Amino acid sequence: LIEEDKVDLMIAIQTPNTVIPVVQVAERYGIPCIATQAPIDPVANSLDEYQWTYLAFYTLDQVYESQRALWTKAGHAPGSGAKVGLLFANDADGTAWHDIFVRRLAEDGYVPVDPGQYPSHTTDFTNVASRFRAEQIDVLAGTNIPPDFMNAYNAIIAAGEQVDCITMGKCCLLASDVEALGNLADGIMTQVWWTPTNPFQSELTGETCASIDEAYAADHQGRTMPQPAAYAYAALELAVHTFTKAGTTGKEKVRDAIGSLDVMTLIGPVKYEHKMRGLTYSTTVLCGGQWQREDGELVLKVIDNSLYPEIGLTGTYQNVNATLK
């Protein structure tokens, strides 16, 4: 794209596995880059200096606080001494989550049960499940690709461990992934970055979260627009705002235009006013959700908005986790 097609701007979306290598190339070649949908920490940790990249998403401290609020709703508040089993791969994303969770769990009076990070695409989680069973964990927390979580979850079930509360990133964001778990999906909790009920309206197009979801449903057999689609839409909003503001494709002016944006998008306000290890970023909305059955269908309900009270709740915590109960 850079050497042959001579692009004026890179857009990098969706998980550190994609975003990190793209922004590293953009930095190497001096190409302005708009990145979304990858936690700030692992991207910031991947280079010592950033001059061309601007990232909009959440930090892992925000993730931890969001999951802690969900554990609290399930009866495992800070200071309770609850045992939290950690399930993290040994990739950039998993390592960044792991290190922050281990530190903050101890600070909050939880007992981390850490079997060690596993190689992504592992199929045998027997040892991990046995450790969780021996320790009798109260909470299972992590972030995994769907196949890894499925294999680990089945191993935990086979080991006979009873997990009272499950909070998972990445693998439990989409209904299609969660539905694959059948009844075991009921009650699993995860991050909520975007929903059709969010109170945002695109400054660029006038679309609201509700109206774009209606348009998506009309084209997709009535399905709700998934969270990543909203971030893809927002990345293009930011690109249009950037070129409009820059008035040119000159790379330095395009870069400076990104950095000076202060706009309302479909995912909420974006303003690049924070720094982490030289990476300039904007935080975005993060709430806590739970998958619940509604007329036989799994629906992701927003049950905690403690980090962003302006986001309306769409449900309340239900102790319906079918895991081994």
Image (spheres, grey):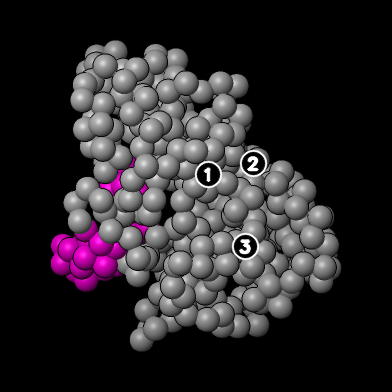
Q: Categorize mark 1 by other alpha carbons within 10 Å: few (<14), some (14-19), many (20+).
A: many
Question: What is the spatial separation of the Cα atoms under label 2 and label 1, in whole angstroms?
Answer: 9 Å
Mark 1 or mark 3, earlier in chain: 1
The secondary structure type at the circle numbered 1 is: loop
- Residue situated in front as seen by the camera: 43 or 137: 43
Q: Quadrant of the C terminus?
A: bottom right
Q: Is residue 269 left or right of residue 212?
A: right
**Mark 2–mark 1 CB contact (< 8 Å):** yes
Q: Is residue 233 left or right of residue 272?
A: left
Measured as percent of width and height from the top left, residue 245 is found at 25, 31
> For the magenta stretch, what is the residue range?
207-235
For disc 3, the marked residue is 67
Q: Quadrant of the N terminus?
A: top left
**Amino acid, disc 3:** Gln
**From this viewpoint, which residue is outermost toward the bottom?**
295
The secondary structure type at the circle numbered 2 is: helix
In which image quadrant can residue 9 be found?
Answer: top left
Measured as percent of width and height from the top left, residue 122 is found at 60, 46
Residue 291, compared with residue 60, is above or below; it is below
For disc 1, the marked residue is 39
For disc 2, the marked residue is 96
- Residue situated in front as seen by the camera: 19 or 209: 209
Residue at horizontal 54%, vertical 38%? 274
